[in-house]
Image (spheres, rainbow, N blue to C red):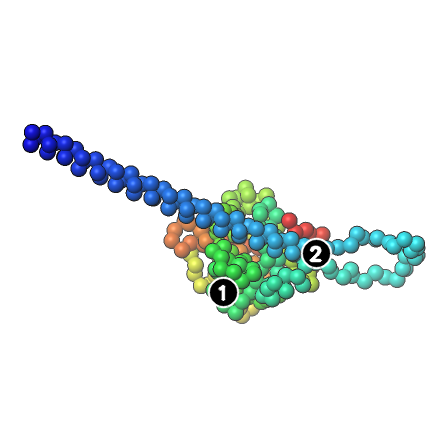
Amino acid sequence: MTGEKNKREGGRHKRRPSRVTDTILVVVVLLCGILLAGNILKETAQRKREEEIRKLAVQEEAPAGALRDGETQSLPDMEPEEPAEYHSPVDFESLRAVNPDIVAWIEIPGTDISYPVVQADDNETYLKRDFEGNKSAAGTIFLDCDSSSDLMGLHSILYGHHMKNQTMFAQIVKFKDESFFRENREVILYLPESELHLRTIAAVYGDADGEKRRTEFSSLERFNRYVDEMTKNCSFRELPEGDVEGLYSFVTCSYEFNDARTILYAVREQDGENGAADGKIE
């Protein structure tokens, strides 16, 4: 009898670890579900805020040539025409009321990149802060604190996180693919008084070497040597025939190795930097 009793008790003891394991698995699954739901809610809130900022950025324009009832149209002015005043499609006044640090709006056709660009006194402020100043893992697209705030310096550097949900600058890494690069050559920077149409020239990945942040050069010749050095590892780069007068670097995290970066390089178009205001915020 004693032997049978011991067997029964032994069986009960053997089943206990299984129950404990099952309980632990249930708890782990629940915790994973809670974390996943939390991340989904955060991403949804992030996208909602981004969409609200985009709506705020769209400039409301009256229909061109609209006339009031009873108004007659005068004869055309025969005087030589002056250059048309630039009207940005971006409502910088409304955006500035939300965040006075705004300096531009970036749009890259062929991608979902369409965001405000800010600049602070350092390169830490907007790493974990959204455009409205809220804590955010996505941060905000920002201009290097050492770059010229009018984006007309020799080297303008813009940073954005590589988010898993493909927001911010995540799609910059697509330009490392030669086919995608050749099909998407334009970057548009909307400024309060003008807009810059840039042409991509190279896309590379590498380390976070401080030399990539250089913004001051002793001469235009020295600067053009710098452009050549920064882009030489791109097998499909296309440098302009003449001197580069303004380089733009769009930087995001990359995963080829620890602390890697992908950089898309572009230059100002030679045939007019302040193109017609026919771009739209999408």
Q: CA distance from mark 1 to mark 2?
A: 28 Å
Q: Is residue 233 visible?
A: no
Give x and y (percent) for residue 52. 61, 53
Q: Is residue 266 visible?
A: yes
Earlier sequence position, callout 1 versus callout 2: 2
Looking at the rendered structure, the secondary structure element under dot 2 is loop
Looking at the rendered structure, the secondary structure element under dot 1 is loop
Left or right: residue 21 compared with residue 265: left
The one of 75 and 45 positioned closer to us in this rendering: 45
Q: Characterize the local packing of mark 2: few (<14), some (14-19) or many (20 or more) Cα atoms within 10 angstroms.
A: some
Give x and y (percent) for residue 165. 49, 47
Q: Residue at x 21, y 35 (%)?
A: 15
- Does residue 216 sit above or below 52 in this rendering? below
For residue 62, what is the image quadrant? bottom right
For residue 147, what is the image quadrant? bottom right
What residue occupies the far left of the structure in this picture? Answer: 2
For residue 136, the mark is none
Q: Residue at x 17, y 37 (%)?
A: 13
The one of 258 and 42 positioned closer to us in this rendering: 42
**Which residue is labeled 1 in the image?**
125
Q: Residue at x 71, y 52 (%)?
A: 278
The one of 212 and 110 positioned closer to us in this rendering: 110
* Amino acid type of the residue that numbered disc 1 sits on in the rendered structure: Thr
For residue 59, the mark is 2
Give x and y (percent) for residue 185. 60, 48
Give x and y (percent) for residue 208. 43, 59
Left or right: residue 32 compared with residue 66: left
* Amino acid type of the residue that numbered disc 2 sits on in the rendered structure: Gln
Which quadrant would the N terminus be assigned to in this image?
top left
Q: Characterize the local packing of mark 1: few (<14), some (14-19) or many (20 or more) Cα atoms within 10 angstroms.
A: some
